[in-house]
């Protein structure tokens, strides 16, 4: 098997979302992704995952839901087959109990471990102090900026100068015409300081939404060409800005700049962990 054929999309492509916004996966689709040819063999893995769930004192029915699916057959006939709807946590347990000799299992273990941790952070987020919120969102933004850069590259934004222009268009849309340099000056930062490291959680969240939605738009609409990519980034930034305005929020350029940078918060956290 060539692992280059697999990525996060291997599991993202088979993810389903309920009307209430809950993510889930179907066992038979996961079976195929994990290269199990026999459903009965994969059911053995699912049963081991259920046992692990029970051992952890977590409700099995909350994470493994038996369902029936109707599939098409030759000559228009239909057949009902058994399947299992799985939560993210259930998938994580399946990965821990699947055949470790399959290279794709290692990828799945990483993917679902990260997704489970993200959900934990999301669940805890309302109770986190501002410093922890900033660190969590800044980490997510760093990852999504990399993905945005990849999407922009695929659209034709290749040279560093062109990418800087592309980024400025997003900022201009979100910040009412301000460029990255304008924002840098408004925050009174030194030349070596990055503007994203000097944003509060609310401002970071607005930029995270800008980045994720621009990446999605570039890929969804298969946008090609620097001018069209720039226009898409500006459009998304402007849409995020209008949404903030409609909700009665503070415009990002008017939000206060925190006293401590992300780098200072990270340094303090490392020291705190070291002293424990």
Image (tube, helix red, strand yellow):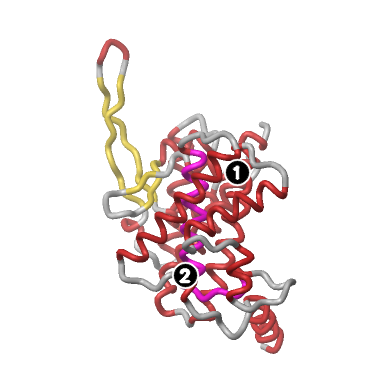
Q: Report the front residue among 167 and 81.
A: 167
Residue 127 position in % (x across, y down) = 42, 79
Can residue 190 be seen from the camera position used here? yes
Residue at (48% x, 44% y) in the render: 12
Q: Report the front residue among 66 and 274.
A: 274
Disc 1 vs disc 2: Cβ atoms closer than 8 Å? no
Quadrant of the image containing the N terminus: top right
Q: Is residue 204 magenta?
A: yes
- The total number of labels drawn is 2
Closer to viewer: mark 1 or mark 2: 2
Q: Is residue 247 magenta?
A: no
Q: Which residue is mark 2?
A: 252
Q: Callout 2 environment at 10 Å: few (<14), some (14 to 19), or many (20+)?
A: many
First-in-chain label (1 vs 2): 1
Q: Which residues are magenta?
A: 197-219
Residue 44: assigned label: none
Q: Of all residues shown, which one is farthest toward the right? A: 192
Residue at (61% x, 83% y) in the render: 260
Q: Is residue 140 above or below residue 218?
A: below
Q: Kindly state the secondary structure of the residue where label 1 is placed.
A: helix
> Mark 1 to mark 2: distance in Å?
24 Å
Q: Kindly state the secondary structure of the residue where label 2 is placed.
A: helix
Residue at (35% x, 48% y) in the render: 17
Q: Is residue 41 above or below residue 160?
A: above
Q: Report the front residue among 177 and 154.
A: 177
Q: Is residue 255 above or below residue 99?
A: below
Q: What kind of secondary structure does the magenta stretch mostly adopt? A: helix
Can residue 48 be seen from the camera position used here? no
Residue 152: assigned label: 1
Q: Callout 1 environment at 10 Å: few (<14), some (14 to 19), or many (20+)?
A: many
């Amino acid at each position: 098997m060539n692992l280059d054929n697999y990525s996060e999309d291997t599991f993202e492509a088979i993810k389903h979302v309920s009307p209430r916004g809950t993510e889930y996966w179907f066992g038979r689709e996961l079976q195929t992704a994990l290269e199990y040819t026999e459903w009965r063999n994969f059911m053995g893995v699912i049963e081991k995952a259920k046992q692990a769930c029970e051992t952890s004192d977590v409700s099995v029915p909350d994470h493994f839901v038996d369902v029936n699916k109707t599939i098409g057959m030759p000559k228009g006939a239909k057949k009902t087959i058994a399947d299992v709807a799985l939560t993210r946590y259930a998938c994580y347990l399946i990965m821990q109990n699947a055949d470790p000799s399959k290279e794709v299992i290692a990828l799945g273990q990483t993917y679902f471990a990260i997704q489970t941790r993200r959900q934990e952070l999301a669940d805890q987020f309302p109770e986190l102090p501002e410093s922890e919120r900033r660190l969590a969102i800044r980490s997510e933004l760093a990852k999504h900026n990399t993905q945005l850069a990849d999407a922009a590259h695929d659209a034709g934004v290749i040279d560093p100068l062109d990418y800087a222009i592309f980024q400025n268009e997003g900022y201009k849309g979100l910040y009412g015409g301000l460029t990255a340099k304008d924002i840098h000056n408004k925050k009174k930062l030194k030349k070596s300081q990055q503007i994203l490291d000097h944003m509060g959680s609310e401002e970071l969240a607005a930029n995270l939404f800008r980045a994720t939605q621009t990446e999605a738009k570039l890929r969804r609409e298969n946008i090609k060409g620097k001018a069209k990519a720039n226009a898409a980034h500006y459009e998304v930034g402007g849409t995020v800005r209008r949404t903030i305005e409609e909700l009665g929020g503070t415009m990002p350029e008017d939000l206060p700049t925190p006293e401590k940078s992300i780098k200072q918060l990270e340094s303090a956290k490392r020291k705190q962990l070291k002293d424990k």
